[in-house]
Image (tube, grey):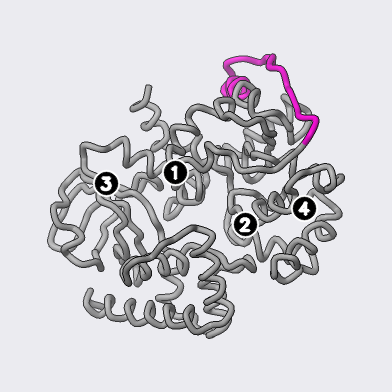
Amino acid sequence: MIIVDVLKEISTVMDSLFDFVVNDEFLSKDFECYLQNNNYEIQTSSEFNNVLTEYLLDKKTRAGVGVLDYYREKTKNNSSIIEAFKNSYEGIFKINKISNNTFDVYSLINEQDMTLLSLVKATSLRGVGRCDFLHARIIEYENVFYILEIFDIIGSNYTQKAYQNAIRMLIEKPRKLVWKNEQKLNQIKEESKKMYECFKKTFKKDTLIVTNKCADNIIANFNLIYENKTDEFKEKIEGLEEYSYFKVEEFEDDNFILNASGGFSSHKSLYDIGLMVDLNSGFFAIPFLGTFNKIFEDKSQVKNYKKCILEFLFDDKIPPIVFIKHKNVLDIINPILKENGIKEVGSVDELIKIFKSEWENNYGFSSIEALYNSKLFSEYLGFTN
């Protein structure tokens, strides 16, 4: 199929998706909530289309279902274009060669050489040269990779910025590391097992709840043990007496990567961190895991517990295991779902299927495992040291 025909077919399907969101009662209201929650102030039709595309391809509804999944269920449309949209990939790509409308690139996040054909207007690519970086969304359709959207063009003189953006994406969506990279997936599976065994041997359990002020030192000490540089754990483990959920300023700040590299201890607030291992998913450092667990012991002792529950449900980085561990999970969660206009669930399996489908349908792993196995992150540390 020639590129003009592909562009026409994609445009037709995208127009039908746009119309569906506008005309479907549930999705139209959900999209309005999405705009309000993210404080979007749309001035032009182009801005509206960009935000609507983001909503369609990346987001879940307030009922926990992916927007495209909702569309497919309602319309029974399972076309290959819809499937390509569902599996779209946003990343940072270093340009190695340009010829006509084709780009030979290296994908920073999943470490793959790729050839991309552009579906965007030529004016969007004016001035782009070899060694520049594309922040773009791509799709695979009929075994060809197409550039669907370009969010930014980063000049070759701003390599560190390109790496920072790529690392942010990797932290938010760890599975980006293994997209089209089976070898990397197998590597992470092996590392996850080794990490699990080492953690259990060191601490005699699979979860530690500590304060953010001591978490960095504990992680560093454990990392030395894991790398066989020491066999002694000597850091003090400190916990909290009172639990409360709140927004951590540094997680919301635009300087996310800089704040993350400074560690949890650099944050102004005091909160708990759950250091946890899972045999299949590796090592996790989960802010407010102790707070979350306390809710199922006595929710009256946890401030803002409802917000905590919702955040853990809708955060794709939180693994299903944290819910499975609690026998009274539905007793606590269902009233909160009902209060927020979300359908109650009848079982833990249904809860996982709806809210943690990315973990159930794919091999999931933690952001820490992704960074630990990422060439991108290692190279970035080389820039900053």
Taking the spot 74% from the left edge, 65% from the top edge, the residue there is 339
Circle 3 or circle 1, nearest the eye: 1
Q: Is residue 239 above or below residue 66?
A: above
Q: Secondary structure at mark 4?
A: helix
- How far across and down, in percent of the image, does residue 298 sit? 86, 45
Q: Which residue is mark 3?
A: 94
Choose the circle earlier in sequence order: 1 or 4: 1
Label 3 packing within 10 angstroms: few (<14), some (14-19), many (20+) = many
Q: Using residue 45 as the reference point, say whether residue 315 is left or right of it.
A: right
Q: Which residue is mark 4?
A: 324
Q: Secondary structure at mark 1?
A: helix
Q: Which residue is mark 2?
A: 314
Whether label 2 touches label 1, CB < 8 Å:
no
Q: Secondary structure at mark 3?
A: strand
Q: Is residue 152 above or below residue 190?
A: below
Amino acid type at mark 3? Lys
